[in-house]
Image: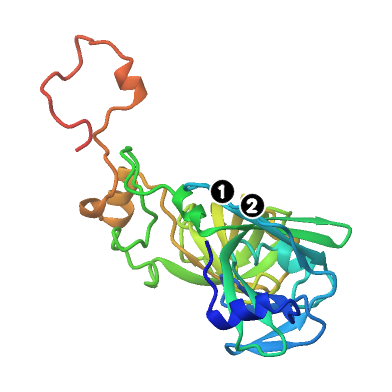
């Protein structure tokens, strides 16, 4: 049960309150926004909370145990601060939302009610609903290691040890052509062979997708022009001249770790685990029964 300060409790008990709700939103790219259901601007902790006409919070269903508490905040897309384009681009995916109850006549009298992350966002005819998931959501994230033949970390992870910012593994490029929704042609990667950046990741340094990341599904080189394809419809949001920085990719296999990076010592998988085909097979006269490693 939430315990309020004595001053705030006395104000609630007075029967004539001057309270409003405030939402402090911090996106993954560091942008901080503030909104309130009050009709005037409110400022505290260095953040200005602007009136958001039509913005309102839903009831909160609190569950017992480790279940995730959820609520919603909904309103009309009227502010340039929250544009439909930013929502579509995923800039609010996983953003941290702090919900305050504030005495608008004396903002020093306030209470932090919740700290959530934004889950699903639904938009219908200019009305949006953002699902707020409580901090118990972190309990749903798998912890520990995976016992599998492939590596359980991505290239560049501290456990991997590869410096993906090195010139051998990182490069800047510029869009030459938007081929379709999922593929683009770029210049600046002629020094890298095909598939060098397959399974890699890029960060946009200009354009509408500025500061956003995308995973590269396929990378091919033809002459001095490289083609990069993605699982997401990146082509809907980029144009000729947009720039990005891309990091080397890895399919997380033991052979790739050794052949491409000479990094077998830091491989974070278990390449000697037999696969399903081995477990279901039967002994053959030509098989090696010495007990040696399956992969050397």
Question: Which quarter of the figure is the C terminus placed in?
Answer: top left
* Vertical comparison of 202 with 233: above or below: below
- State the SS at label 2: loop
Which residue matches tag 2?
Answer: 61
Let me know if residue 294 appears in the view: yes
Left-right relation of 145 to 83: left
Residue depicted at 33% across the width and 15% down the height: 280
- State the SS at label 1: loop
Q: Do labels 2 and 1 touch, CB within 8 Å?
A: yes
As rendered, which of 223 and 197 lies closer to the eye? 197
> What is the x, y in percent for residue 290?
10, 22
- Determine which of the numbered discs, if any, sits on residue 63 in the image: 1
Q: Residues within 10 Å of mark 1 (few under 14, many from 20)?
A: few
Residue depicted at 51% across the width and 53% down the height: 137
As rendered, which of 189 and 3 lies closer to the eye? 3
Q: Residues within 10 Å of mark 2 (few under 14, many from 20)?
A: few
Q: CA distance from mark 2 to mark 1?
A: 6 Å
Residue 235, picture quadrant = bottom right
Left-right relation of 238 to 109: right
Residue depicted at 27% across the width and 50% down the height: 267
Seen from this angle, which residue lies furthest left? 290
* Vertical comparison of 180 with 41: above or below: above
Let me know if residue 238 appears in the view: no
- Determine which of the numbered discs, if any, sits on residue 184 in the image: none
């Amino acid at each position: 049960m939430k315990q309020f300060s004595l001053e705030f409790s006395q104000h609630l008990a007075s029967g004539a309150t001057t309270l409003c709700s405030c939402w402090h939103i911090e996106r993954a790219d560091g942008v901080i926004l503030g909104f309130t259901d009050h009709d005037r601007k409110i400022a505290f902790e260095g953040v200005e909370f602007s009136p958001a006409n039509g913005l309102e919070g839903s009831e909160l269903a609190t569950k017992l145990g480790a279940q995730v508490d959820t609520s919603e905040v909904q309103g009309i897309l009227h502010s340039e601060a929250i544009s439909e384009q930013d929502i579509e681009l995923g800039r609010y995916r996983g953003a941290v939302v702090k919900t305050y109850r504030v005495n608008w006549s004396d903002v020093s009298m306030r209470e932090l009610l919740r700290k959530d992350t934004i889950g699903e966002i639904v938009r219908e005819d200019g009305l949006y609903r953002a699902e707020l998931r409580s901090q118990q959501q972190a309990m749903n994230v798998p912890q520990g290691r995976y016992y599998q033949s492939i590596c359980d970390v991505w290239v560049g992870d501290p456990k991997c040890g590869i410096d993906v910012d090195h010139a051998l593994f990182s490069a800047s490029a510029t869009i030459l052509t938007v081929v379709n929704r999922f593929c683009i042609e770029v210049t600046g990667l002629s020094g890298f062979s095909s598939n060098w950046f397959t399974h890699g990741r890029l960060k946009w340094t200009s354009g509408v997708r500025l500061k956003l990341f995308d995973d590269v599904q396929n990378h091919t080189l033809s002459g001095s022009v490289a083609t990069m394809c993605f699982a997401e419809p990146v082509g809907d949001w980029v144009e000729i001249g947009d720039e990005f920085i891309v990091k080397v990719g890895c399919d997380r296999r033991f052979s790739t770790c050794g052949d491409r990076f000479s990094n077998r010592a830091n491989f974070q998988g278990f390449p000697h685990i037999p696969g399903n085909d081995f477990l279901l097979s039967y002994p053959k006269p030509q098989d090696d029964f010495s007990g040696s490693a399956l992969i050397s």
